[in-house]
Amino acid sequence: NAGVMQNPRHLVRRRGQEARLRCSPMKGHSHVYWYRQLPEEGLKFMVYLQKENIIDESGMPKERFSAEFPKEGPSILRIQQVVRGDSAAYFCASSPHPGHISGNTIYFGEGSWLTVV
Amino acid sequence: TQLLEQSPQFLSIQEGENLTVYCNSSSVFSSLQWYRQEPGEGPVLLVTVVTGGEVKKLKRLTFQFGDARKDSSLHITAAQPGDTGLYLCAGAERSSNTGKLIFGQGTTLQVKP
């Protein structure tokens, strides 16, 4: 039973380029969460999506960042015109039910490490 | 804004010693999770506590949720080098219906052989 799969695991981008991070939730999970872990900081919530819907994007930066979870295929976190401050580990998590129903238990992937040079 | 504060931030002990990590807040959480994270990897769920006063055991790890659901503790008995890692507590906002988690800053544990 595969866990949450993220790719790429490591990504290097030059300033101004676009970064696309992909996340396939655990089998049977239709709720996806993205978190960011900046160097020397804790994990911070970014966005919560269900299939084809953004439910809570209160943690997303207002510009350059977007997320989607299409009917078919993985969830995508897209960062346009990356800057050095975007360098971080981006973690995807999933749950079988809405978080508050599953005891707020979510399962994390191994993360995607973005480095902006 | 709800915050979770973990203490201590760093802990270095010898194999066989006992330790306790604390996770505190002035806010009430509907549930609280503990995760362990190794360098270069994602957080791995250890336990979820939901009921105030709840105690859960996972081998040598004992987790407790405070009666008022504002704090939690993780106690490790007879620590082993394999316990080394970053321990994170995370709580769900009581008013949230999205499962959004607030994470503490983490406790880095080093167990020396």
Image (cartoon, coloured by chain):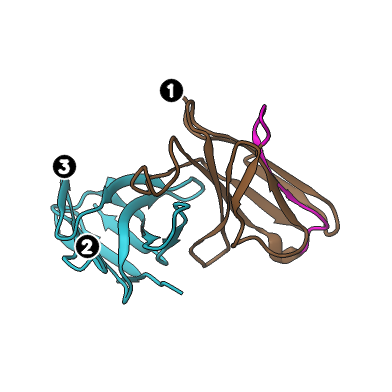
Which chain's residue wears label 2? Answer: B
Q: Give above or below for B104 relative to A97.
A: below
Q: Identify the element where label 2 is drawn.
A: strand
Q: Give above or below for B30 relative to A23.
A: below
Distance from disc 1 to disc 3, alpha carbons, whole Å, reads: 24 Å
Q: Give above or below for A114 relative to A83.
A: above
Q: Which residues are magenta?
A: A70-83
The picture's colour for chain B is cyan
Decide if residue B75 is on the left or right side of residue A35. left
Quarter holding the N terminus of chain A is: top left
Q: Which numbered disc covers residue A1?
A: 1
Q: Which residue is mark 2?
A: B73
- Chain that is brown in the image: A
Q: Identify the element where label 1 is drawn.
A: loop
Amino acid type assigned to the residue bearing label 2 in the image: Ser
Q: Residue furthest top?
A: A1
Q: Residue at x 52, y 41 (%)?
A: A110
